[in-house]
Image (cartoon, helix red, strand yellow):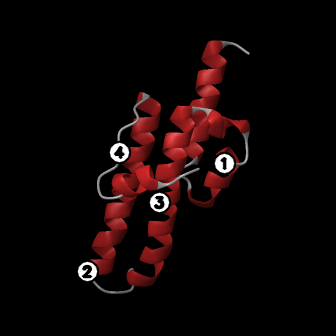
Amino acid sequence: MSSESSKSNNNLMAALSYLGILVIVPLLTDAKNDPFVKYHIKQGLVLLIAYVICGFIVWVPIIGWLLGILLFVLFIMGLMNVFAGKQQPLPVIGKYAEKLNI
């Protein structure tokens, strides 16, 4: 497999990390051994946990809606980081992702 093909596969696996329960796909493959993919898996897991918690809070007017919008913005930022090839922590949740041991 060429280096370019491997890089695009790692980008795909890292992007899947931000798509909710699909974080399981890169987590169960050899892609998790790549430092770039592992970094985004950790952030994706924390974002998934935040979405689950937000599922209960979103019914609270204004506060819940703002939290939902924040999580959507973090989702977009995560995908932008993947396709830019960056390992940049997401605001608010990045510090929790760094503490995960996968």
Residue corresponding to mark 1: 27
Number of on-image labels: 4
Cα distance in 3D space between marks 2 and 3: 23 Å
Of label 1 and label 4, which has the lower sequence position? Answer: 1
Residue 46's disc number: 3
In the picture, the disc for residue 89 is 4
What secondary structure is found at the residue carrying circle 4?
A: loop
Q: Residues within 10 Å of mark 1 (few under 14, many from 20)?
A: many
Upstream in sequence: badge 2 or badge 3: 3
Query: Mark 4 or mark 2: which is in front?
Result: 4
Per the model, the C-alpha gap separating discs 1 and 4 is 19 Å
Q: Amino acid at mark 3?
A: Val
Q: Which residue is mark 2?
A: 62
Q: Secondary structure at mark 3?
A: helix
At 31% from the left edge and 62% from the top edge, which residue is drawn? 70
Q: Amino acid at mark 4?
A: Pro
Q: Residue 14 got which mark?
A: none
Q: Earlier in the sequence, mark 3 or mark 1?
A: 1
Task: From the top left corner, tell me how far across and down residue 84 is, in percent.
Answer: 41, 29
Q: Nearer the viewer, residue 101 or 77?
A: 101
Assign a secondary structure to mark 2. loop
Q: Residue furthest top?
A: 2
Which residue is pictured at 66% across the width and 19% down the height? Answer: 5
Task: Tell me the amino acid under the disc marked 2.
Answer: Ile
Q: CA distance from mark 4 to mark 3?
A: 12 Å
Q: Where residue 8 sits: x, y (%)?
A: 60, 26
Earlier in the chain: of badge 4 and badge 3, it is 3
